[in-house]
Image (tube, rainbow, N blue to C red):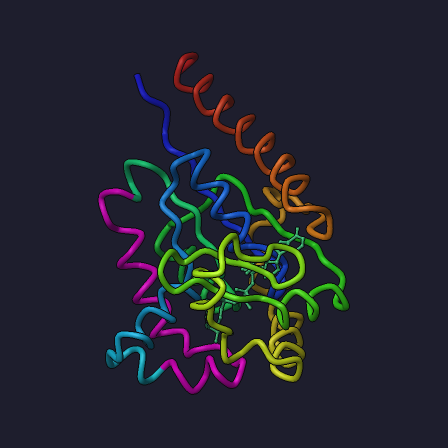
């Protein structure tokens, strides 16, 4: 008998390391990574209707209207791969309305991870962040420089990663975080995201391994 796959939400301020940890979680646990930021950036890059609507909000560091994002997430969660392999929802819900929508759809995670990082570190992380458009990998000029000159030459900077926009993103995060996470207080695990990438992952890995074990035990005893 197979146990139910893991359902994980990861949240935290801009540049708290969600995308970085998700790369590692996917490698180890094989979950389907659903990042609303990545999905929206892909729509913008492809010039779709959704992308055209979302672009201005994103570039200004504001939230994209709920109905656009929610339709995208609901669509992605209903794919067969997410049901089979489990999912890792990154950057959603980000408002009370989005959390209520998930409740209505009866979508509930096993665990709600919050990466906790002080503001001054966040700004440094954003301003130095670079993305590889070919592999989607996240780099940082100081902390995780690219491996080769070839990769370095093609790295791009996100338009919302200027110091001024990061501050406004952070304000919006702080205004919404409590309401967005209130449904999940009983399954919330706060992790110190200011530690090294490997140290943060070690904590997440042990948390998820334990959960996976618990789920397998439920299947055995049930
Ligand atoms: P989104 O892409 O979700 O942006 P975000 O929440 O601001 O988060 P980031 O992607 O900036 O950071 P991260 O936590 O993933 O950090 P990362 O791992 O890259 O959303 C973008 C926009 O889309 C929003 O502003 C909004 O407009 C829209 N949007 C998205 N979801 C929405 C929703 N639900 N509703 C409405 N609108 C929505 O790390 C950052 C940097 O730090 C990197 O350079 C990395 O290399 C480095 N780093 C990571 N970990 C460490 C470490 N431990 N030590 C040192 N450096 C580290």
Image: 139 above or below 170: above
- Residue plotted at (51% across, 23% down): 214
**Percent from the top left, x then y, of residue 208?**
53, 33
Magenta highlight on residue 60: yes
Image quarter hosting the C terminus:
top left
Position of 129 with respect to 66 (left or right) is right
- Residue plotted at (37% across, 50% down): 106
- Residue plotted at (39% across, 40% down): 31
Q: Nearer the viewer, residue 11 or 66?
A: 11
**Percent from the top left, x then y, of residue 195?**
73, 47
* Residue numbers of the magenta segment: 54-81
**Percent from the top left, x then y, of residue 50?**
29, 78
Magenta highlight on residue 220: no
Image quarter hosting the N terminus:
top left
Assign the magenta stretch its main secondary structure.
helix
Ligand 1's image quarter is: bottom right
Position of 123 with respect to 25 (left or right) is right
Q: Quadrant of residue 12?
A: bottom right
Q: Quadrant of residue 171?
A: bottom right
Q: Residue furthest top?
A: 221
**Percent from the top left, x then y, of residue 133?**
38, 65
All told, the count of numbered labels is: 0
Position of 41 with respect to 113 (left or right) is left
- Residue plotted at (45% across, 65% down): 98
Q: Residue furthest front?
A: 149
């Amino acid at each position: 008998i197979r146990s139910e796959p893991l359902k994980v939400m990861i949240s935290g301020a801009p540049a708290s390391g969600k995308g970085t940890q998700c790369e590692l979680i996917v490698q180890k646990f094989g979950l389907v990574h659903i990042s609303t930021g990545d999905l929206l950036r892909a729509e913008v890059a492809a010039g779709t209707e959704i992308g055209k609507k979302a672009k201005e909000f994103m570039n200004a560091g504001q939230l994209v209207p709920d109905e656009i994002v929610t339709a995208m997430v609901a669509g992605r969660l209903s794919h067969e791969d997410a049901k089979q392999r489990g999912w890792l929802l990154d950057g959603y819900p980000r408002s009370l309305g989005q959390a209520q929508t998930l409740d209505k759809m009866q979508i509930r995670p096993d665990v709600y991870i919050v990466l906790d990082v002080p503001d001054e570190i966040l700004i440094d992380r954003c301003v130095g962040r670079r993305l590889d458009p070919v592999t989607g990998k996240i780099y940082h000029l100081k902390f995780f420089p690219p491996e080769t000159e070839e990769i370095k030459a093609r790295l791009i900077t996100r338009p919302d990663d200027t110091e001024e926009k990061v501050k406004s993103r952070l304000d919006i995060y702080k205004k919404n975080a409590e309401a967005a996470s209130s449904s999940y207080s009983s399954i919330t695990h706060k992790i110190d995201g200011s530690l090294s990438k490997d140290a943060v992952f070690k904590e997440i890995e042990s948390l998820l391994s334990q959960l996976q074990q618990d789920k397998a035990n439920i299947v055995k005893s049930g």
